Amino acid sequence: MTSRERIKTIFAGKPADRCGFWMGNPHADSWPRYFDYFQVADEQSVRRLLGDDFLWVWGGAYRHPEGKPEIDFHRRDRGLSAAGCFADCEDVDEVEAFEWPNPDYVDFSATLETLRQAGDLYRASGMWCPFFHVVADAFGMENYFIKMYTHPEVVEAVTRHICEYYLAANERLFTQAGDLIDGFFFGNDFGSQLDLLLSPELFDRFVMPWFRRFTAQGHAYGYQVILHSCGSIHKVFDRLIDANVDALHPLQALAVGMDASALAARVKGHIAFLGGIDTQQLLVHGTPDEVRAEVRRVKALLGPCLVVSPSHEALLPNVPPENVLAMAEEARV
């Protein structure tokens, strides 16, 4: 099987010739260490040496004719609770008057060229569509959750504008890309280390209607749908499966209810898996032999519909290259 065939088969819920492998999307500061260890000069050479099956091509570049940013909520700082411009909003008219991003300004030329050069790799793309986080930025996270109770119509209006922008931008990309894309990969971190960030009831009202729109859009173009969500999200597994998500990423191994054994007991056979190898402790502090043993354990629990990958894609410089190599080699056995 080619890498493209292998991952398509796995995400379709069928056994492939072996489990897949994706090293993730390492932090920019991590790459020099990999170049030195593997004695190569570029990212693609590292991936080829590791037998990477998966290519993630991020959405597009926002190019406003006047140089304006994609969106600016005038937040005071980058903290999750830093108030955005709608922190005190009580009127939907204020939301409607805001200068929302225009999907006509998204440039997909670099994305399309990368997809054309992808060879036999599985191609995951689409706007990242982090609507949950973007709405939180509009209010500040604490204000966001409070507004769900005090001014739900304002939250719904902000969410609608953000989601409609991403949906429209996706339409433009998907129409241009056609079968250059295999999977629509998008992400929203719905969980903390311990639990969902909001109750299942609020999740159903403010998140799921749009989540279904995004998954339906991907499937309408014939793409598999891969959801990224860090944290403990086991309380909404049933919603994700009902929305026809094909694969779940990154399986944050140390979050409550997200260990491979728990996933196997609850959702194996209903969804494919991408991730699962702990980046909080194991890949940072473990030995290569310990990494290999954990990969074998996760494969035994979650295979065959599994793409072995870190439990967070942004590998930091504190992850030794020899552990990444051990993960890759054991994944391909």
Image (spheres, rainbow, N blue to C red):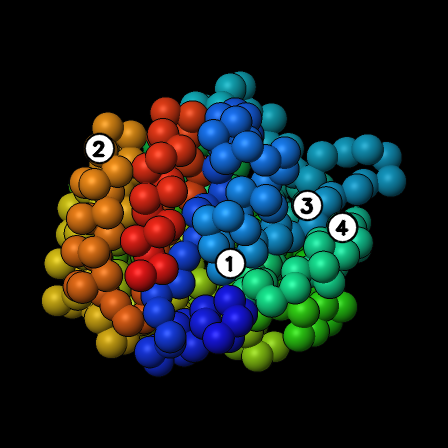
Q: N-terminal of the two: label 1 or label 2?
A: 1
Query: Element at badge 3?
Result: loop
Task: Give the Cα distance between marks 4 and 3.
Answer: 24 Å
Whether residue 292 is situated above or below residue 55 in the rendered picture = above
Tag 3: amino acid: Trp
Name the residue: 59% across, 44% down. Answer: 45
Q: N-terminal of the two: label 2 or label 3?
A: 3
Mark in the foreground, 3 or 1: 1
The residue carrying mark 1 is: 54
The quadrant in which residue 94 appears is: top right
Q: N-terminal of the two: label 3 or label 1?
A: 1
Residue 100 got which mark?
A: 3
Image x and y of residue 116, in percent: 73, 63
Image x and y of residue 95, in percent: 60, 44
Mark 1 crowdedness (10 Å alpha carbons): few <14, some 14-19, many ≥20: many
Task: Give the Cα distance between marks 2 and 4.
Answer: 38 Å
Mark 3 crowdedness (10 Å alpha carbons): few <14, some 14-19, many ≥20: some
Mark in the foreground, 2 or 4: 2
The residue carrying mark 2 is: 286
- Do residues under tags 2 and 4 come within 8 Å of each other at their CB atoms? no
- Do residues under tags 4 and 3 come within 8 Å of each other at their CB atoms? no
Q: N-terminal of the two: label 4 or label 3?
A: 3
Tag 4: amino acid: Ala
- Do residues under tags 3 and 1 come within 8 Å of each other at their CB atoms? no
